[in-house]
Image (cartoon, grey):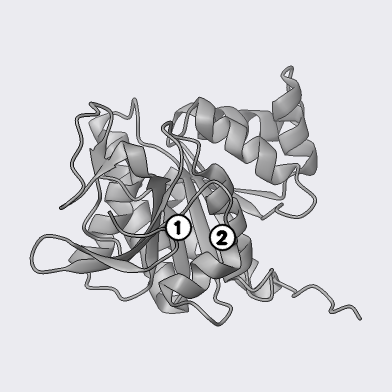
């Protein structure tokens, strides 16, 4: 097994390969970024959520807005994108679109080591998922439940952006209980509160949050905190990929690096 905090190569299919690093529960995101080869601040986008309970029509629309909106924007901006990295849900849509279009932007999949499989790391865990071959990098964290990687996603987004010297933001697609918890923690954090683009119409938590946002109030305390404190921007799936790219561009243009102190 590769040593922790050391970069190694994971062979993928079609003669592709990805850089990877395994990390322990106590980690330094600056060391992780450097180990993966990122030494300069880059625009960074994390994607949270899933694709569960979507109709075939909604899945097709989501695939379209991901490929022609989010993924194309990342390529145009040379931004780093972070997602769950596995052969399931949204990471498949992102990874497959990157691969199909032969894009070069870095796509980092972050997941618990015990819940993934790849060549040389097969296990009996029925919940373990293969890694998606459209990704260029992987960070494999400690933990044996999905959600254990959430802190790494948050802190690595902050670090890769140069602690917000470059734009850093999130995109919410669909999502369930784990996503809801992640969104609450990130939007109510003083340090890690990134703007969040909510793709309305993708179902589950994205639509719950969209309805609460339009109402301006919610019975659940966590939802109320998110709409009160979060910097939310809603894009309907029906608006299409051009509108998503336009709103992402506006967020990037409006970005102001934090003032330097000392």
Label 1 sits on residue: 82
Image position, residue 157 (x, y; %): 57, 61
- Single out the mark in the foreground, 2 or 1: 2
Where residue 22 sits in the image (x, y, percent)?
A: 40, 55
> Circle 2 sits on which residue?
156
**Residue nearer the viewer, 31 or 60:** 31
**Residue 139 image offset from top left, x and y in percent:** 41, 56
Asked which secondary structure carries label 1, the reply is: strand
Q: Is 223 drawn above or below residue 103 in the view shown?
A: above
Q: Quadrant of residue 97?
A: bottom left
Q: Which mark is residue 188?
A: none
| Residue 127, above or below 50 | above
Residue at (48%, 64%) from the top-left corner?
245
101 relative to 108 in the view: left or right: left
Question: Distance of mark 2 from mark 1, alpha carbons?
Answer: 9 Å
Of 154 and 199, which appears nearest the observer? Answer: 154
Q: Is residue 116 visible?
A: yes
Report the number of discs. 2
Which residue is located at x 8 percent, y 65 percent? 14
**Residue 258, image x, y percentages:** 79, 72
34 vs 99, nearest the viewer: 34
259 over 192 or under it: above or below: below
Q: Quadrant of residue 54?
A: top left
Would residue 17 appear left or right of 37 to someone viewing this image? Answer: left
Q: Are marks 2 and 1 in contact (CB under 8 Å)?
A: yes
| Closer to the camera in the image, 241 or 108 | 108
Q: Residue furthest right?
A: 262
Quadrant location of the C terminus in the rendered image: bottom right
Q: Earlier in the sequence, mark 2 or mark 1?
A: 1
Secondary structure at badge 2 equals helix
Does residue 69 appear in this view? no
Q: Residue at x 74, y 17 (%)?
A: 219
């Amino acid at each position: 097994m590769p040593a922790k905090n050391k970069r190694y190569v994971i062979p993928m299919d079609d003669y592709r390969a990805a850089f990877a690093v395994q990390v322990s529960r106590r980690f330094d995101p600056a060391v992780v970024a450097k180990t993966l080869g990122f030494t300069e601040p880059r625009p960074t986008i994390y994607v949270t959520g899933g694709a569960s309970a979507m109709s075939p029509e909604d899945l097709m629309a989501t695939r379209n807005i991901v490929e022609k909106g989010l993924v194309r924007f990342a390529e145009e901006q040379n931004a780093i994108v972070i997602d769950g990295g596995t052969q399931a849900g949204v990471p498949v849509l992102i990874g497959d679109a990157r691969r199909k279009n032969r894009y070069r932007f870095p796509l980092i999949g972050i997941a618990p080591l015990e819940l993934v499989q790849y060549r040389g790391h097969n296990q009996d865990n029925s919940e373990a998922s293969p890694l998606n071959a459209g990704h260029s990098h992987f960070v494999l964290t400690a933990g044996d439940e999905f959600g254990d990687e959430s802190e790494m996603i948050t802190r690595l987004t902050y670090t890769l952006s140069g602690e917000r010297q470059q734009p850093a933001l999130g995109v919410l697609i669909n999502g369930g209980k784990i996503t809801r918890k992640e969104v609450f923690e990130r939007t109510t954090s003083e340090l890690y509160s990134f703007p969040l683009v909510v793709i309305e119409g993708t179902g589950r938590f994205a639509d719950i949050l969209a309805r609460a946002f339009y109402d301006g109030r919610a019975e659940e305390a966590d939802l109320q905190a998110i709409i009160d404190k979060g910097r939310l921007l809603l894009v309907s799936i029906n608006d299409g990929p051009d509108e998503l790219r336009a709103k992402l561009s506006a967020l990037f243009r409006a970005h102001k690096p934090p003032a330097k102190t000392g």
